[in-house]
Image: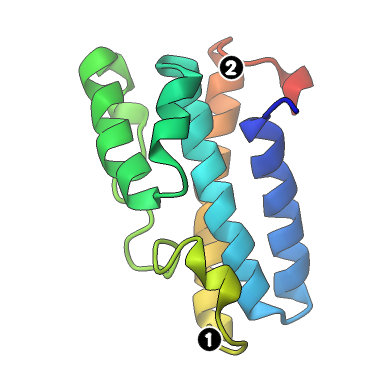
Amino acid sequence: MEESFIQAAGRHLHDAEVLLARHRWDNAVYLAGYVVECTFKVLVEQCIDNKACQKFGHNLTELEGKGTERLRIIYPILDSQLPISRTNGTVLTDYHPQRRYFRSDLWNEKEATDAVERAAEIYNEIIPRLILDGRISSEEL
C-alpha cells in the first residue's frame, strides 16, 4: 500500500477535532500526535526523501529535532519557515505512540485542547506553504 503522509495528517487532524468536540480527550491527543508526526514527515519527505521518514518512525522528538536540523543544514532558506520546538508545552510528545495502549482519562480537556490546537497550527503552517511553494500539489490533499 502506498503511504500518503499528507493525507494521513489531514485525516487525523479532522478526526482529532471531532473527538475533541465529543470530549474524547485521550483519542484526540493520540491522533493529534499523528498529525504532527505525519506533517513533519511530509516536510522531511519533500526536502530529503522517504527513507529518512521511515528512519524516524514514530519518534516526534527525533523528527522535530534531528529531522528539522537536517533540513536547516541542507536548505538554509527553510530555517525561518520551520516550526521550532512547537510541541513544547503540550502533551504531544509524551509517550507517542505508546499512549494508544494507556488507560482512559489520562489527558484532561485543557491538555487535549492544547494538543489538538497545536497540531492544527503546525499542519496549517507547513502544508499550505509546501503547496504554495509548488513542492506538493493541492490534489494530494
Q: Is residue 61 left or right of residue 126?
A: left
Give the x, y percent position of residue 114. 50, 69
Q: In the rendered view, does 139 fall on the left or right side of 130?
A: right
Total label count?
2
Instruction: Return the residue at label 1.
Output: 106
- Tag shown at residue 132: 2
Which tag is nearer the camera, tag 2 or tag 1? 1
Depth order, front residue of 133/112: 112
Task: Give the residue at x 62% y 33%.
Answer: 5
The kind of residue tagged 1 is: Leu
**Residue at horizontal 47%, vertical 32%?**
54
Whole-number angstrom distance, CA of label 2 to CA of label 1: 38 Å
Lower position in the chain sequence, tag 2 or tag 1: 1
Q: Is residue 21 visible to us here?
A: yes
- Few, some or many residues within 10 Å of mark 2 (<14, 14–19, 20+): few
Cβ–Cβ below 8 Å for labels 2 and 1?
no
In the displayed structure, does residue 25 sit left or right of residue 54? right
